[in-house]
Image (spheres, rainbow, N blue to C red):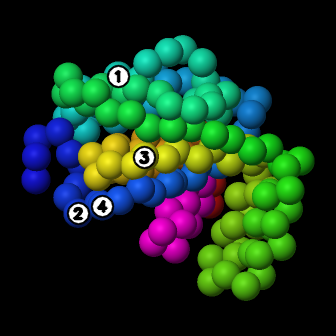
Amino acid sequence: MPASSPAAGAAGPAEFHFFCKAGAPVAPAKVARAMSSRGFAVEIAGEAPLHQRQGPVQITVDGAPVTVSFSAIGADHPEWAALRASAGGRPDGEQVLLALKLTDTRVTVRADDPRGVEWARELARSAALLHIGAFENPGAGRFVNFSR
């Protein structure tokens, strides 16, 4: 495994979600510090909270640039209602409903290349854990609610 990669094996574009409260800003410096605590030097460009980001954002991992993209929806968005409606048919539906009840924002972190995918996943997981929210990997069918 390369020194600047948290795990090997990701391929192709992928997106990851983290759920948080809009009133509790997801500060990039806090997320970078949490990611760096695992032995990587991580920097996230800009100061705007992650749940307010739209479009590409450059992060730096061990001095090398990585580009990920952000988008977010709030509890008033039709996709939020669709997620709530689909929870009954999911094995993790109870966790999804609890996360939707305790949060009001879903942030999508997306990357197109294998290295970006690895770091998009780590960034979303770190943000969710720091903010006692939830993390979802739709490609793997995995939903983790950190508030429980």
Task: Give residue 12's position: percent from left, percent from top.
Answer: 35, 59
User: What amino acid does circle 3 point to?
Assistant: Ala
**Quarter of the C terminus within the rendering:** bottom right
Residue range corresponding to the magenta coloring: 134-146
Is the residue under label 2 in contact with that under label 3 (CB below 8 Å)?
A: no
Which residue sits furthest top? 47
Q: Quadrant of residue 73?
A: top right
In the image, residue 14 above or below residue 52: below
Spatial distance from mark 1 to mark 2, Cα to Cα? 23 Å
Is the residue under label 2 in contact with that under label 4 (CB below 8 Å)?
A: yes
Name the residue that disc number 2 marks: 9
N-term-proximal mark, 1 vs 3: 1
For the residue pair 119 and 91, the one nearer the viewer reads as 119
Instruction: Please tell me whether mark 1 sits on a helix, a strand or a loop.
Output: strand
User: What amino acid does circle 4 point to?
Assistant: Ala
Instruction: Please tell me whether mark 3 sits on a helix, a strand or a loop.
Output: strand
- Judged by its main secondary structure, the magenta piece is strand
* Residue in the picture at 52% in, 45% down: 109
Spatial distance from mark 3 to mark 2, Cα to Cα? 14 Å
Name the residue that disc number 4 marks: 11
Name the residue that disc number 1 marks: 43
For the residue pair 92 and 113, the one nearer the viewer reads as 113
For the residue pair 5 and 34, the one nearer the viewer reads as 5
Instruction: Please tell me whether mark 4 sits on a helix, a strand or a loop.
Output: loop
N-term-proximal mark, 3 vs 2: 2
Badge nearest the viewer, 1 or 4: 4
Q: Which mark is residue 111?
A: 3
